[in-house]
Amino acid sequence: MSGDSFAHFTPSRHLESQVILAKADSREMRWSPNSLHLCAYVISAWVFGILACSKQKSDGASNDAKDPGAPEGTVVDDSSHSKLDSQIRVAYFVPADRQPTSNYEKKIKVLLQFVSDLYKTDLISKGYTTEGLKFQLIGNDPVVHLLRGKSEAAVYNGAPNYDSLIQWSKIIEEIPVEVGTPQSNVIIIFAETYDPDGSAPIEFNGGVALGLRFSTKGGIGLFSAWILRDEFCATSFDEQKARFFDVTPVAGRTALGSGQPNSPRFEFIEDGFGAVAHELGHAFGLSHELRRDSLDIMANGFRNLRVNYKADTKQEDRVGFSPDNARLLLSSRYLGSNLDLDDHLPPTIDASLDSLKAGDTTLKVSVSALDDRSLHSVVIYENQHDTVVAGRELTGTAATFSDNIPIATLKPGNLIVKIMVSDSGGNLTTKEISTVVAP
């Protein structure tokens, strides 16, 4: 993709699945350099509620939509019979006691160019047809809505007891309906709520990176605007590309990827730009994927983005989405082509799981799925290792299969398996099977 065009941004007609919800520190992504250690974003409704065995959720299955500022994902009413506005909204949120950073519109445009390039290039390399991410535009550029907060930054970030879930709820509450709503639009928000001064164990105090799918129509990705600082974000594509290889130490700051003080500049850039791609994936309904941890956007791969800009990187060594998550992405109305926009009825799922004991390395899952028009894909996830473990394309109005799925060694205790089925209209249904792994 060239650095001076948004040609592929053409207009067109829940918080993360992780049982640990720690108020760890300024940013809720607590990962080791090589593996996911702790992810306290909040992306699926099932993390927060009381889980019933074999509970099923559909994008269009409920009229009980909750306050979008609530700290849990929710099943929302998705029964509208109008064509959907599948254009991503972008907002820059500035508290009452802060000023917008310099050149914020140009910087956000550059950042989104990199993120869209990552999505589009990877999906096309897998043989899919896509225009890339579809943004609300003025001319060829994404619209950036400047939102002035009602309160000071500390009200949102909770200083000195920083809490990203408080930021999530308070900021979403202040999104004007003319910008969009989480139930009806995917919205990317850059928040100037981090504290730029003072030491921090990781990056900056008050940082946040969260994502959640609300429905077929909507989701939220919320990110700290520290990534828009002059030392990290450029105002041109080519200058930003060069910064991915800038090893200059950032004095007194520690990037989350390496966890080393005075981390090199490129680590902050990979972490910030990559977090936007990662959390946006959650806003589209994707789960973590650790089968290729260091190269997967939905794992730690987003902290290795610069390999994609090295001339000698082979296709198989590029950072991207797993085939299973990529397939699910293509059922999103913000990315997919030839979707049935008149389809508002989600698929139904019946599923079962064989009994399990500690030490098992296989899941036997049986699935039966039905849709009134056409099924699209299925993805299977298990929470002990916080990863997608299987998936496949689905066709026709009915599909039935049983698979023995290889997984990492199970430990005794609770286990949740999620079966996510999408249809040709972009509707998604999730079946959750809660069980206990015997000693």
Image: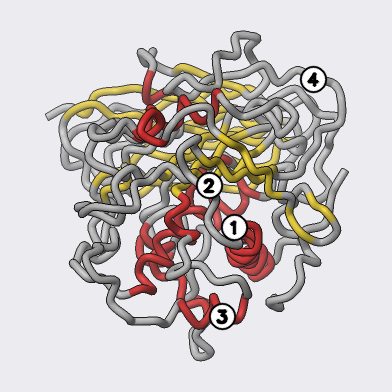
Q: Amino acid at mark 3?
A: Glu
Mark 2 or mark 1, earlier in chain? 1
| Mark 2 to mark 1 CA distance (whole Å) | 10 Å
Mark 3: which secondary structure?
A: helix
**Figure check: 217 above or below 331:** above
**Figure check: 201 above or below 4:** above
Horizontal side of residue 172 vs 359, given as left or right: right
Mark 4 or mark 2, earlier in chain? 4
Name, please, the residue furthest toward the top: 64
Mark 2 vs 1: CB contact within 8 A: yes
Tell me what residue is drawn at x 33 percent, y 42 percent: 206
Mark 4: which secondary structure?
A: loop
Mark 2 sits on what residue?
190
Q: Position of residue 400 (x, y in %)?
A: 60, 33
Mark 2: which secondary structure?
A: strand
Q: Nearer the viewer, mark 4 or mark 2?
A: 2
Tell me what residue is drawn at x 53 percent, y 41 percent: 94
